[in-house]
Image (spheres, grey):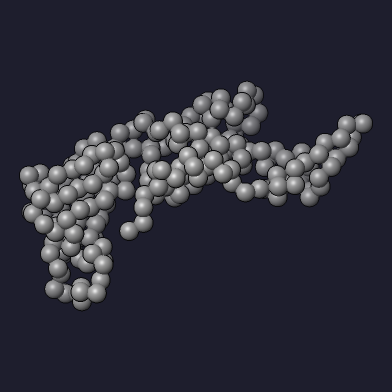
Amino acid sequence: MSLDTLANVKLRLGVTASDDDSLLAALMDSADQFVAEFCGRDFGGGSFTEYHPGDTAVAFLRNYPVQSITSVKVDPAYGFGSETVRPATAYVVHFDRGIVQSLTGPFLPLWAGLPVFNMPAWMRAPRVVQVVYATATGTVPADVREAYALLIGHWYRYVKTQVASGFQNIYRQTAGGTTVIFARDQIAGGALPPDLSRLLGQYRVPPI
């Protein structure tokens, strides 16, 4: 699911014609993937299944705010059958931050099959906790949508500049008494807009 509609992206970019709709739609696909990878999150919402280490009392979900928890299962055999479901009374959910916190200590204490003493907690009993949950759809933050359009606009200008210059590395073009000067960084593609990191930085999932 795209982070925004084509109509809204065109509105933010000031594009009124429909000639470049196919190009903009292709750039939107790329921007969806860029934002998801940059932030480590899926802002489109929906249902998700994630796996987390067991030798810790918290599971940091990738996507939040969380709308609902379907199930929390713990299984060192990785079968995750119905018998491995943890009762809802055994954990609490911090919905706004996407954290599932066990009320009984680690989901699965130190796994005897691994030399755990010199390992960080996230490497112990790997992927033995399965969390199925859902986040709301259609609730992409406004500043994420602004960054999304900013990125699409950056790529869009690059394509249009390349077309206008005949896909040549020229910086000045004169025709019929009219001179057009292309910015050197735009010809080269240019660095990503600095506001992109400012807008998206607060939404990045911190590395473990």
Relative image position of residue 181 (x, y in whole percent): 81, 39
Q: Is residue 62 visible?
A: yes
Q: Which residue is located at x 78 percent, y 50 percent? A: 169
Q: In the picture, which quadrant includes the N terminus? A: top left
User: How many numbered badges does the structure rendering display?
Assistant: 0
- Residue furthest bottom in the image: 115
| Relative image position of residue 78 (x, y in whole percent) | 19, 61
Residue 108 position in % (x across, y down): 13, 61
Q: Quadrant of residue 65?
A: top left
Q: Nearer the viewer, residue 23 or 137?
A: 137
Residue 26 visible in the picture: no
The residue at the far right in this view is 177
At x 20%, y 48%, the residue is 100
Snapshot quadrant of residue 12: top right
Rendered-image quadrant of the C terminus = bottom left
7 up-or-down from 47: above or below? above
Residue depicted at x 38% and y 37%: 44
Q: Residue 163 is drawn in which quadrant?
A: top right
Please give the name of the residue rendered at 22% of the width and 52% of the height, measured from the top-left corner.
Answer: 59
Front residue of this view, candidates 123 and 17: 123
Rendering coords of residue 154 (x, y %): 61, 40
